[in-house]
Image (cartoon, rainbow, N blue to C red):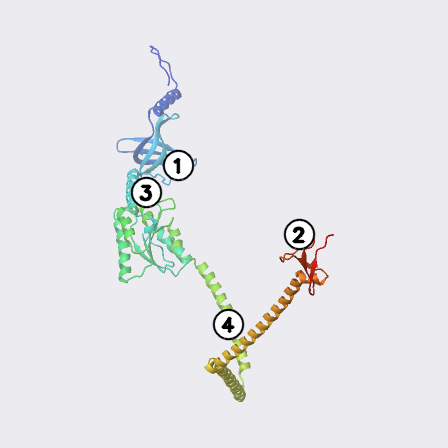
Amino acid sequence: MLQHPVSDNPPTLTVGQLNREARRLLESHFDYLWVEGEVSNFVAPSSGHWYFTLKDSAAQVRCAMFRNRNQHMRLTPANGMAIRLRCRVSLYEGRGEFQLIVEFLEHAGAGALQAAFERLRDKLQAEGLFEAARKRPLPAQVKRLGVITSATGAAIHDVLTVLRRRCPSVEVLLLPVPVQGESAAGEICAAIERANRWHAEGLVQLDALLVTRGGGSLEDLWAFNEEIVARAIVASALPVVSAVGHEVDISIADMVADRRAATPSAAAELLSPDQREWIARLTQLEQNLASRMETRLRQANRELLHLRERLRHPGHLLREQAQRLDDQEQRLQRAQRTLLRDQRGRLLLLESRLQARSPATRLRNLQDQVARLEQRQQRGMRSKLQAATTRLAHMAQLLDSVSPLATLNRGYSILTDNDGKVVRDAEQVAAGDLLDARLARGRLRLEVKPG
């Protein structure tokens, strides 16, 4: 900011310096503002910038919105349009014009609409109406589709074009309604309820409903953000697909619908199979059927040839049956003989068991057992007697080997004194003592002589 010293002669400024100072004062004093008014004198030169005048009943102001800002806007201003814009206050130095540098713009009243949209969104979300678990699945195949939209809008044209291309067999029941304006929301609700009533009463069988319209501003799409429309979609017994606006547009109807499509064309694709895929599938099924029929015919021909080979003259069959009867008779006879032999063997076995258990047989067996025991006893006694005899002889031999008699037989004798004591030492006797000498055969009376 220029400093002006207190002087009787202030400095002289150029026009450029004055305008630059005025711009700096404006831009430093004002922050971003929201301004609302009506568009006039709109110009969009080849540079891509937008220039227009914003006015109301009392005043007007020049506005500029440069290309780097307006290229992201979905709304293009038009003369007479009521808009609300976010801007900075500035001054165009070249002409000394007070102007607004626009950063963002929307339809007038869009801010209030956005706030109302967010309030309703939060309310319905708290009730759980956006939850996937609440939503109904779409049918596997849609044969008749109810479309709730404007009869003259681009949306119905896009839907019919896609359906004719993908699957012409899908029937479309159009329930025409206004898609914007004060009465639009009520008529959309009435169309949803009417379609459900017709379906429930069997007047018209519908598989699904499509609620749709083309793109537009938030104000244009507002009918699909009304609470009554949202609750009508939730209450529908028929599954509902919502395709409101362009891909970037999200409405309350999209959030509560069973499925959301980005555009009307995308909704038509979602609700219809591609007939080219069906034709390819049918062609494949036809080829598979033809192949299986050929295989079945070849198999039937083989079975027919086999049956022809098996088909013979009745006389041959009779002879074969007679031979088979003879074979069966022989098998029966063999079986009877085998059975009789088995029964006879079993009878003999039972007889032998009976005889074995009779008293006479048991007595004979006991007598035989007694005889065998007697024989074993006699053999045992003879064996023990022989063993005892052998042992006795052995003991006798042992006794003889240690007996004094054996010693006497070798020429020895046993001397005893008058008392019968055996004389073992010469000192036991004296001269004149009489001794008895026992020999192997006989006895001698000896007198001791001095030596």
**Given contact means CB atoms under 8 Å apart, are the residues at marks 4 and 3 in contact?**
no
Q: CA distance from mark 1 to mark 4?
A: 71 Å
Q: Residues within 10 Å of mark 2 (few under 14, many from 20)?
A: few
Looking at marks 4 and 3 on the same chain, the residue that comes earlier in the sequence is marked by: 3
Front of the two marks 1 and 4: 4
Looking at marks 1 and 2 on the same chain, the residue that comes earlier in the sequence is marked by: 1
* Residue 308 left/right relative to 436: left
Q: Amino acid at mark 3?
A: Leu
Q: Which residue is mark 3?
A: 218
Q: Which residue is mark 2?
A: 428
Q: CA distance from mark 4 to mark 3?
A: 65 Å
Q: CA distance from mark 1 to mark 3?
A: 17 Å
Front of the two marks 2 and 3: 2
Query: In front here: 269 or 439?
Result: 439
Q: Is residue 255 above or below residue 141?
A: above
Q: Which mark is residue 422?
A: none
Query: In front here: 369 or 342?
Result: 369
Percent of width and height locating residue 129: 30, 48
Residue 186 in view here: yes
Q: Which residue is mark 1?
A: 70
Q: Amino acid at mark 4?
A: Arg
Looking at marks 2 and 3 on the same chain, the residue that comes earlier in the sequence is marked by: 3
Looking at marks 1 and 4 on the same chain, the residue that comes earlier in the sequence is marked by: 1
Front of the two marks 1 and 2: 2
Q: CA distance from mark 1 to mark 2?
A: 169 Å
Q: Residue furthest front?
A: 432
Front of the two marks 4 and 3: 4
Q: Which residue is mark 4?
A: 296
Q: CA distance from mark 2 to mark 3?
A: 166 Å
